[in-house]
Amino acid sequence: DSGVTQTPKHLITATGQRVTLRCSPRSGDLSVYWYQQSLDQGLQFLIQYYNGEERAKGNILERFSAQQFPDLHSELNLSSLELGDSALYFCASSAQVGYNEQFFGPGTRLTVL
Amino acid sequence: GENVEQHPSTLSVQEGDSAVIKCTYSDSASNYFPWYKQELGKRPQLIIDIRSNVGEKKDQRIAVTLNKTAKHFSLHITETQPEDSAVYFCAVLSGGYQKVTFGIGTKLQVIP
């Protein structure tokens, strides 16, 4: 157990819908990363937050947004869902930015029908 | 942006043999190179990492080497065991706020 929690574990929804994925980092970690893992794309970095502020952006679609709250938990919002958004979404946390090990949560499996 | 290529995509070795996975990157400013192991149905876990001011790092049967001039780094696993079977991802962190780029992954199978 990495200490990072993600909810829900599984999510099944329809195209066009909106969902929110939640992540709680390890106690004391200030940095949260979001990743998308699909079979043909590997692990794609989406976005990083540090102590409530967005710090780095990867291949995140405009339909997706995220935020980190004062209690350091983070939410990833996915809207206007498409079939291709079906994937495993991981969040990871680290103590700070930079040369720090990232601890991954168990992931949220999103299925868009 | 950063481009990371990882080879091979699949690798089968006999138990006890060595396995080598190589990654190349494009951004010379990249400064941190972790390797993650992901077992089937589980989360990625860090197995070893190296910083840009170090050429080699070893941890028991696992080692990573970095060639900054050629912009490539490699994971070496010696005396492989069946429990080493997993998907291995390299990653590259660059930029002041650590944008992360992962390789496509290597599926390693260790045959008993």
Image (cartoon, coloured by chain):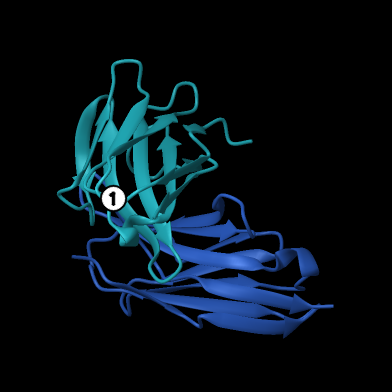
Chain colours: A cyan, B blue
Up the image or down, A52 lies above or below B96; here it is above
Q: Is residue B35 visible?
A: yes
Residue B102 lies, in percent from the top left, at: 38, 63
Residue B104 lies, in percent from the top left, at: 42, 71
Q: Residue at x 42, y 62 (%)?
A: A38
Along the viewing direction, whichever of B92 and B70 lies nearer the viewer: B92
Up the image or down, B11 lies above or below A68; here it is below
Q: Is residue B109 left or right of residue A3?
A: right
Label 1 sits on what residue type? Leu
Residue at mark 1: chain: A
Q: Is residue B11 left or right of residue B5?
A: right
Residue furthest to the right in view is B112
Residue B95 lies, in percent from the top left, at: 21, 52
Up the image or down, B107 lies above or below A21; here it is below
Look at the numbered disc 1 and give the secondary structure of its residue: strand
Residue B31 lies, in percent from the top left, at: 32, 57
Total numbered labels? 1
What residue does disc 1 label?
Answer: A46
For the residue carrying disc 1, how many other residues have a C-alpha within 10 Å: few (<14), some (14-19), or many (20+)? many
Residue furthest to the left in view is A62
Along the viewing direction, whichever of B13 and B56 lies nearer the viewer: B13
Q: Is residue B52 visible?
A: no
Residue furthest to the top in view is A71
Q: Is residue A90 left or right of residue B11?
A: left
Give the quadrant of the N terminus of chain A: top right
Q: Residue at x 42, y 58 (%)?
A: A37
Q: Residue at x 23, y 68 (%)?
A: B28
Instruction: Specify the quadrant of the image occupied by residue B53.
Output: bottom left
Along the viewing direction, whichever of A61 and A79 lies nearer the viewer: A79
Give the quadrant of the C terminus of chain A: bottom left
